Amino acid sequence: MAIENRGTTDAPLVDKASGILIALAMVFANAANYGFQIVCGRLLTVEEYGLLAGFMSVVTVITVATSALQTTAARAVAAEENEPGGPFIDGLTRSSFVIAAIMLVVTVIVSPMASRFFNIGTLPLILLGVYVAPSALDSIAVGRLQGLQRFRAMAFYSTAQASAKLALASILLAAGLRATGLVAGLILSSGLVAIIGTVASREAGSIGVHAFDPDVRRAFAAFTMLWFVLGADVLFARAFFVDTAAGLYGAAAVLGKAVLWIPAVVAQLLFPRLAKRSKHGESVAGLALRAVSVVAVVVFCSVTVLWAFGDTVFRVLYGERYVGAADTAWKIGLAVAPLALVNLLIVHFLARGQGHFLGWMVVVLVGEVAALYLGPKTDDFYATVLAASGVALLVLMVPSGAWRRETRRLLRRHQVLSTG
């Protein structure tokens, strides 16, 4: 799995060379992941691509949810709570496989109803349930490497996982396999690389912490809900749009949500500093302000490029068939901008060991699903729902006292500037 989504990992501060290498690995992994989508978009029909886009939305949710296991593994190894030379299949791995088995059973039970609602077959849904196991193993392998402070190995592993997915997709498409075959290939490539990563990280020994521990549950819930908020629109587009419109919306969502690339990298690199400062009771306001500034600039530039050159971008990357998605892509990019800041907030709260925001995430997620189900089935409305969900999370997750303090601070600063 690419490490771009792993905002919950409490890693030690790294040296400059390792930090640059990890950042480059994140960029490469993201590029390979989006390359996978673009290659599929060019070689599949628009209708088939709409089906694949729905699958990949669920894959992203699973990937991010299981990344909570990376946090657990990294913290256990870094804190020397591991057992060198212990059993190869340790407590964390066993409990993760138990969760994966439960998820597979649930998927099998709900797949007949879900396949009719989302207009997809039963087999792909079962395959998505199978994907939980390799995704969990992948997260644990990365966490062990990070806990060992083997950052170069961690970067290499990330690029290998993303590259394997892109290469296998190209082979399967050339062999004539379509969306369901690509999902099966994704499971195969992820599982094989995860096994290699597990063997390579055996130095970390056995981790006795279980996947049911509170910190894991908190991170699991937070990032699962965040990325479902981010990806639910594609699933509902598959359910309610005609096949061609769903394919165009899926392509627009891929490039529109690419504005979250660098904000995700910022969140990954910011987490250790937030955790360290929070632990010692130091202020994080200055650090957070710089992070927000970087996110704001990146989102503004990305959305501007999509607005001004969207037709050309889609024509070059996806082909002439997808040019109609350009007008929707920049709107989706603008709509998900608040969610980039929400991601930073979640990282901040998790670094402090807080989970008060989870209730608000449930409320917003339920509201978003209801709006997508009951509202108009148009691109513009779906983008509006995304934007409203992000703004609502941004407002609700920050305690009211923090808003009041920040407002007073800004007013005092304005008064000083006015009198000066």
Image (cartoon, helix red, strand yellow):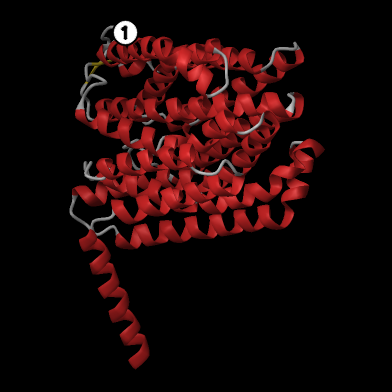
Give the mark count: 1
Circle 1 Cα neighbour tier, 10 Å, few/some/many (<14 / 14–19 / ≥20): few
Instruction: Name the quadrant containing residue 73.
Output: top left
Disc 1 is placed on an element classified as loop
Q: Position of residue 142 (x, y in %)?
A: 41, 25
Q: Position of residue 225 (x, y in %)?
A: 37, 36
What amino acid is labelled 1 in the image? Answer: Ile
Instruction: Name the quadrant containing residue 102.
Output: top left
Which corner quadrant holds the C terminus?
A: bottom left
Residue beneath the point at 37% across and 9% down: 105
On screen, residue 93 versus residue 230, left or right, reads: left
Q: Residue 159: in sight, yes or no?
A: no
Instruction: Name the quadrant containing residue 245.
Output: top right
Q: Position of residue 123 (x, y in %)?
A: 54, 10
Q: Residue 282: in sight, yes or no?
A: yes
Furthest residue in direction right, as rendered: 320
Residue beneath the point at 60% across and 58% down: 301
Front-lying residue, 312 or 289 = 312
Determine which residue is flagged by label 1.
89
Q: Position of residue 284 (x, y in %)?
A: 29, 57
On screen, residue 90 versus residue 313, left or right, reads: left
Relative to 182, does residue 284 appear above or below in the rendering? below
Residue beneath the point at 37% across and 30% down: 146
Furthest residue in direction bottom, as rendered: 419
